[in-house]
Image: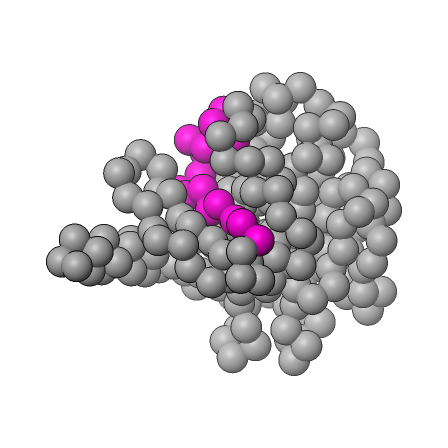
Amino acid sequence: MGDDLSVEAEFTRTLQRLKRRGCNLLLVGTVPDPVLTAASRKLLGDASERRYRLLVLAGSARSSGGRLPTADAVETVRFVTYGDEPRSVDPEIPGRHVDNGLAELGSAISEAVTSFDTESGGLEPGELRVCLDSLSALMDRYDRRVVRQFLGIVTGQVRGANGMGHFVLPYERDHETVEAFASLFDAVIEYRAADGGQERWHFTGRDLTSPWLPV
């Protein structure tokens, strides 16, 4: 019991530190879309505090549905869509569609982050929330090395703004691509479908793993 309490306390402290200084998270697992949508909604934050949210939707299967708090102001949300047009994007929210390579996608993300920083008068730690769903669409088009290089740039932008970014990769945690990308992230969050959706955090570079938790 004592060891379990110690792990739980260390997990809570580590999570609080990541929220204060900003972080990048890799979401993995072959689970139904509603599980990862619920995870995104939680990581993007609720409507009780001001957040600047950027949704990057790659591939026609992706959707914005269910991710954003309904009370959120439109001016604090942006979309960037990439590749095939996604199946559902709120037309009232400002956005940009790009399909001319990862350099253009990275530029669109950077411009959105810069715009938020200007509009906010300087982003506070944890105020910027970024979601990229899904990396599998990029893997279908580009070599793993190229995608990893792109992720290095984007995660650096998020970290530089003290934001919280999460990147969806619907592969199992032991997949070689997950292992190749893991070092770019502060934690890998593993999902399973049990009991409506559960998650387990694996902190990069540390021997610390959370218990399975409800999404």
Judged left or right of residue 128, residue 105 is right
Residue 214 picture location, percent across and down: 47, 63
Judged left or right of residue 140, residue 160 is left
At horizontal 69% and vertical 66% (from top left) the residue drawn is: 66
Viewer-proximal residue, 173 or 95?
173
Can I make out residue 192 in this image?
Answer: yes
How many labels, in total?
A: 0
Compared with 9, 203 (above or below) is above
* Residue 108 lies in quadrant: top right
Can I make out residue 107 in this image?
Answer: no
Q: Residue furthest left?
A: 2
* Residue 34 lies in quadrant: bottom right
Residue 174 picture location, percent across and down: 49, 30
At horizontal 85% and vertical 65% (from top left) the residue drawn is: 91
Is residue 131 located in the magenta-colored stretch of the structure? no
At horizontal 73% and vertical 59% (from top left) the residue drawn is: 64
Judged left or right of residue 161, residue 3 is left
Compared with 210, 151 (above or below) is above
At horizontal 57% and vertical 42% (from top left) the residue drawn is: 29
Q: How is the image coloured?
A: one colour
Compared with 103, 3 (above or below) is below
Residue 176 picture location, percent across and down: 53, 23
* Residue 134 lies in quadrant: top right
Residue 119 picture location, percent across and down: 60, 65
Highlighted range, magenta: 178-193
Image quadrant containing the N terminus: bottom left
